Image: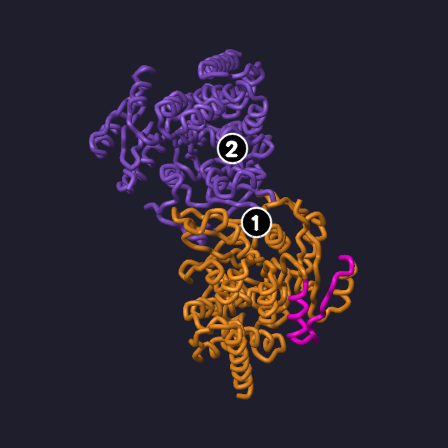
Chain colours: A orange, B purple
Amino acid sequence: MKGRKRVLVLGATGSIGRSALDVIRNAPDRFEVAALTAHRDANGLAALAAEFGGVRTLLTGDASADTIADFIGSVDADIAVNGIAGAAGLEPSRICLESGKDLALANKETIVMAGPLIRTLAEARNRRLIPVDSEHSAVFSLINAHGSDAVESVILTASGGPFRTWSRERLSSVTPEDALKHPTWAMGAKITIDSATMANKGLEVIEACRLFDLPGERVRVVVHPESMVHSFIRTRDGELYAQLSKPDMRHPIAAALNWPQILPNHLEPFDPEALGTLHFEPPRREDFPLLGMAYRSAAMGGGYTIAFNAANEIAVAAFLERRISFIGIAETVARVLEKDWSAPIENFGAVAETDRRARSEASESIQGENSW
Amino acid sequence: MKGRKRVLVLGATGSIGRSALDVIRNAPDRFEVAALTAHRDANGLAALAAEFGGVRTLLTGDASADTIADFIGSVDADIAVNGIAGAAGLEPSRICLESGKDLALANKETIVMAGPLIRTLAEARNRRLIPVDSEHSAVFSLINAHGSDAVESVILTASGGPFRTWSRERLSSVTPEDALKHPTWAMGAKITIDSATMANKGLEVIEACRLFDLPGERVRVVVHPESMVHSFIRTRDGELYAQLSKPDMRHPIAAALNWPQILPNHLEPFDPEALGTLHFEPPRREDFPLLGMAYRSAAMGGGYTIAFNAANEIAVAAFLERRISFIGIAETVARVLEKDWSAPIENFGAVAETDRRARSEASESIQGENSW
């Protein structure tokens, strides 16, 4: 019998990290924790380390980039779950692959910012990139099942966020408190705001294009408020195939950790009766313009997707600090995307430099608006 | 390049036959009609024969069993679409396989009555059995995609028929006119009544057990009035996978004729937005008892599924002739199933004999009730 899979959990005290540890906790015959990292929650990290037999840990909030790289590189693990939020997740993704670990990737910025570089690296090291967010996990399973040659397009579902039915006027007065109420998923603040603006779905469109080698025309979005259907593929014969389960991140995490095997897990299976009523509707592209900007960024190539992501991160932070309005998030990103980001991104240094420049443009743009 | 597939269409003037011919008509590079049969519609058959280049035809209504067998056996075809309604479809299915044709099977009675014999025959002749009704076509595609080892259970969707929401009291006064109004599918009278009683879903449960080698516990039914989700599988990891398209029999027919290839067709692809609102609910087993009887027949084995089907055919005919009530259909089948049908069914002769005996029991039972 092959031994247990050794799992490095990056961002262990966050929503993805805790879900991953619950999957590991409930399949001790298959998985063991190799090491854990957290950003600032020292007590939470210590408690988890104790539970999982005193494994090595690193608190990354005050650590240097070199310290983090050395730690991740030195961990003996078969697979890493990257549950780090935002652009900060890219460098750990790179080091995981460099040091020979498969990568279960919840950090979509890794692909949005550096998809081609990361995929080239994974191929060079013969490591697997397995998406962990619910939509891409569904698409990954569906494409693996049906074969990429049979797939005509991918349709990502979007909850539509808390403002799906709000009028355009009402959207202009959204507060951070309004935006932090997500209808179906309990997640961190950044991704919850991104869900409310549909920037999150935009990032997922870019991720799907980069992960599955599809042009934007073959990646579509349908709003589905119940989040039961995680995504669809449409095959060449016009049939739709969907993956469904309760909205619970432990499903895609279990799928990624078990991959390529399909194995039972401790999660309660649910019956199709429990689907109840499901709704599907087109996204309101005019009122949630970040979705369209993401498509255009994906089509433009170069550094545009890096700029989209960086500008959005800065703008969301500014919104949470009440420095800009909810619709100001999209306005900020739009202003940053008006700059020229067409230079090709040929290495991770160019990714970092483009990211820095876009953040700086976004911050300046926000200060410029506020100084009026 | 391989030549076009030559298709024999059995029941060419019926709903399945005409849908099959529409698929063939729109892919003349892939398919050609080898021959056509119809039951009684001589004019319809002649018109179709003329359209498809004067192909051979047989009107089966007045033909002897030997004439039909000789005709089917002598047709040079790669695949036959069996769209014959009811138990009359079994013998043609057998002859198609005997004479070396793959079988695209819309006639579920073939499997309900003689599943093990037909599958043994198909394997012996190295011919394919491809289900054509929408539910089993969906399950067939899903199992082919995900692999049978990954499948924990199959969940067939049921429209629930026109009486899904009717009270038990109201069900006792259903007329043939009420029952012939199907909410989503336009089909023949027999299958429409079967849909209203849920006997059709019962037959499909038996068919799924026999086609996919599953015990009844692993074949479930969920009511889904919109008929957009054609069926689900649940994989061992608890995920549900569904196939969806507009309710149009040309989809599963095209899938069967193209199998094992997944090829574009002339049918309008539909977007997930067009799904609108979908409902799922448990079947009302107490008020539609034929579903439970089908499960019990599948579990009992022997000739029980033959008896279930035969008794139901006789009872539906009696209902359409106003000799028994709507709820009398289930009562008739229940009385027939009380007899002993446990003798093993070892050859097609035993199938025919059991079928005859069950029809006779059902007719007697109906006469007995009416003579009170």
User: In the rendered image, which residue does mark 1 sit on?
Assistant: A260
User: In the rendered image, which residue does mark 2 sit on?
Assistant: B212
Work out whether A1 lies above or below B367.
Answer: below
Return the x and y of residue A324 as percentages of the image width and height: 57, 79
Q: Quadrant of the N terminus of chain B?
A: top left
Return the x and y of residue B84 as percentages of the image width and height: 37, 26
Instruction: Name the residue: 51% across, 56% down.
Output: A157
Residue A97 falls inside the magenta stretch: no
Using the image, name the chain to which the residue with label 2 belongs: B
Return the x and y of residue B81 as percentages of the image width and height: 36, 31
Quarter residue B23 falls in: top left
Using the image, name the chain to which the residue with label 1 belongs: A
Q: Looking at the picture, which amino acid does disc 2 mark?
A: Phe
> Is label 2 in a helix, a strand or a loop?
helix
Work out whether B70 lies above or below A315.
Answer: above
Instruction: Name the residue: 50% across, 50% down.
Output: A144
Graded by Cα atoms within 10 Å as few (under 14), some (14 to 19) or many (20 or more), the crowding at tag 1 reads: few
Work out whether A294 lies above or below A354.
Answer: above
Give the magenta range.
A52-75
Using the numbered discs, state the Cα–Cα distance from disc 2 to disc 1 in whole angstroms.
24 Å
